[in-house]
Amino acid sequence: MRPVATALLGLLVAVPVAAQSSQFGVRGLGLPLRPISVRATGLGGGFSLFDLESALNPASVGQAVFLTASFQTVQNWRRSESPAGSSSARDNRYPGVFVAAPIGGTPLSISLSASGYTDRNFVLASRDTLILRDQPVEAFDTISSQGGLSDLRVAVGWRQSRAIQWGLGLHMITGSNRIVSHRVFADSTYSGASERFTYSYLGFGVSAGVVARIGKYFTLAGMVRADDRVRVELDTAALGNAKLPLTVSGGARIQLGDRVLLAGSALYRNWSTANADLMRLGGVGSVNMTEFSAGIEYLTDPRRMSHWPLRLGVRRATLPFPLRLGDKTTETALSIGTSIRFVAERAGIDMAVQQVWRKGGVGFSERATLLTLGVSVRP
Amino acid sequence: MRRSGSIPVLLLALGVLAGCQEQLTAPAECPELCPGTSLIIRDTVLHAAPGTDSSFTGYIGANQVPALLVSDGIPALEARAFATFPRRSDSVFIGGTQTLVTLDSVAITAQLIARDTAVKQLTIFYYRIAPDLDSTVTLPALDAMMTPETLIDSLIVPDTLKNGKVLRLVLAADKLDRLVGPVADTGRFGLGLKIKAAQATGIRLGSTFSNEGGPVFIGYGRAATTDTALQKQTLTIPAEKSNYVIDVPVAGGNGRLIVGGKFGTRSILRFEIPRLLRDSASVLRATLELTPAVPVPGLPNDPASLQVRGVLVDLGAKSPALAALIASAPVKANSTDVQFIEILAIVSAWFGPGNTAPTTLLMGIAPEGGSFGRPEFISSQDPVNGPRLRITYALPSRPGHP
């Protein structure tokens, strides 16, 4: 169990710091993240309910017949347009760590994972003109947020049979937003001023799922997840609670011959349940979200599935935290990916590139390119 | 074992990510996009706590002045300077033998710290006066000693002479007898200084307590020796004491805060700042506003520096000033305008949660005891024109809410 202990220690140390920043992550709890592997990312998310290294469906943990650990990092380049202007930004995050292993002598497997739940990294710059001492003084403001919510999951998968797996996951949702607000003036006789504080969050959830193969080539999967209220603190003072949503997702996978896999899934989260709480905390509120994704994987070598396969995916989703009340925010992504395994299939890297378009309200849009790299080992 | 091409791919991927940097800043249209407002900016004027301000004098010893003031015709600032030189030797040691030196000429030098360069035809008059004067001498008494009979010589100062230069009066051999005083002086020499110019003006000279040093007596002579290389000798004698006498104006009295003067008068101000403000606000700008009670006495074109300092602890006149918390502003002579001194660093040190630093200001003039500037300001007894502290501050707004 020594490799397992090492992997678990690595998991605890490497709590992720969310992923892609976006101007659409300013509101609410931030930009929702998807707890999926690099492979599933390359497939648009369509395979995430079936994918062992994705932390969406606890039933997929049942596929773990030997110790597996993976780590991923994502580089984000984006260009945002808003009524205030346009900007280019880039950032690098580590959105996922995953470990799974069979429990010897049982049909059970266990998994620990840390993935991003929401991302709230942003720096907003604006200017204003104030009247100070009867004179107009130009002021430059920046508000920055670092952090987001992470989803720490422990899940157990049960291989009821070769065709059916069940899973149960317990989730701890925790994280913080370190806010820095800074104001400086064009008139140097005025000193700049800053305020720094931290919003911290803590909540819990539970998830359950199933993967069922019907026939030789057709597999269905589904999951449901219920998250409780997340407690919000401002520095050390309790600020309030926000109800977290119920998540329901289902998908299907079809194998076409030896080389082609097709999968698609749909996901629904009733984020509107947090609307009143978020408005009470001073936010704009939240709306329900849906996500549809599909992907196709073409195996160049059917005997070695991870040897340079071609993965293509598409995804369309709505986002739960509008910039303005009543706005509908959408996200559309195209993805491509592949992987390679080496050292006698014990280690490998996965790569995925996504092109993402986000749009919300009048004048707000964004285009992002995300390069995701993952390393997985099976010691 | 088949080698795959994956290792270079891995290295390439790591290299790509290692080269990535973070840059998140985006323009925003607030408050539409911003999650909350930025820091709240406000401005307030606080008056000095009524009846708690006052002036104290005596911070400079009477014989420790950092400059010698000499003036002519400046209202309420008439000043004369004097210096005392010890008995000079009339010989030098050459080859272990005491050898008599006969003076050919003498130079009396002084460092010009400041003058009003707009005033022309400045002339300095040098007098031989009693060498035993001290700080108790009065202006009339000193004037009485400076008569045509005791006049040594005068020096016409070039109109182009800049501050910081040396004034040098040279006396030829035929005038050396003017330096000789009565036998009772036992060889000591007292020097009195007056000035005249095309219009009322003043000068500031280096004193024995200033960095520039006080007046110096330099004698040039010949030693009675056959060695021609050693015949030319110079005797340099710095003044052992120097001081000045100024026509002390009538004290401002009630309702006025005085700073400056020969004895380094200082004023203390106290402000009461609401606790809530001290705990939560950040100071962006703090300006002390002082209204002169009378046109500021001083030497035109030689502004005094009004210095404001914070104190470590408020002990009244003996409050220890914080050397690091200091602000200054020039005070022009004859000005009646409200004086503005930016004291952000001082006031900022008063703010912060639970901060109990004394909200006290100590005001003085620099160089203390060595400047003509001696402003008098309206005190807190006048609720409108008394000292005021104008603070622009920021209050937290706690933006970034979920």
Image (cartoon, coloured by chain):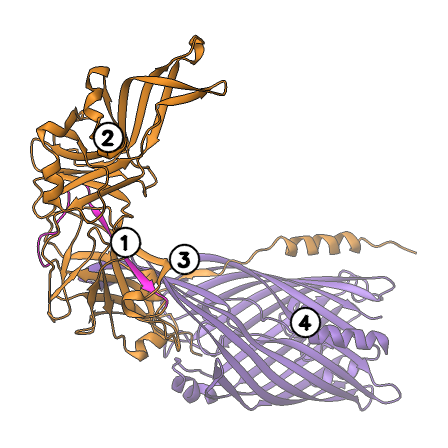
Q: Which residue is mark 4?
A: A14
State if disc 4 and disc 3 touch (CB < 8 Å).
Answer: no
* A315 versus A62 height, above or below: above
Q: Which residues are magenta?
A: B293-312
- Specify whether disc 1 shares its chain with disc 4: no
**Mark 3 to mark 1: distance in Å?**
63 Å
Do the residues indicated by labels 1 and 2 lie within the same chain of the protein? yes
Q: Marks 3 and 4: same chain?
A: yes
- Note the chain letter of the orange one: B
Which amino acid is tagged 3? Ser
- Judged from the image, the secondary structure of the residue bearing numbered disc 1 is loop
Q: Is residue B189 magenta?
A: no
> Which residue is at 49% across, 84% downward?
A232
Q: Nearer the viewer, mark 1 or mark 2?
A: 1
Residue wearing tag 1: B60
Q: Nearer the viewer, mark 3 or mark 1?
A: 1
**Left of A205 or right of it: where is A325?**
left
Q: Is residue B189 visible?
A: no
Whether residue A240 can be seen here: yes
In three-dimensional space, the C-alpha distance between marks 1 and 4, rounded to whole angstroms, equals: 65 Å
Chain A takes which shade in the image?
purple
Q: Are marks 1 and 2 in contact (CB under 8 Å)?
A: no
Q: Amino acid at mark 1?
A: Ile
Q: How many marks?
A: 4
Residue located beneath label 2 in the image: B162
Mark 1 vs mark 2, CA separation in Å:
28 Å
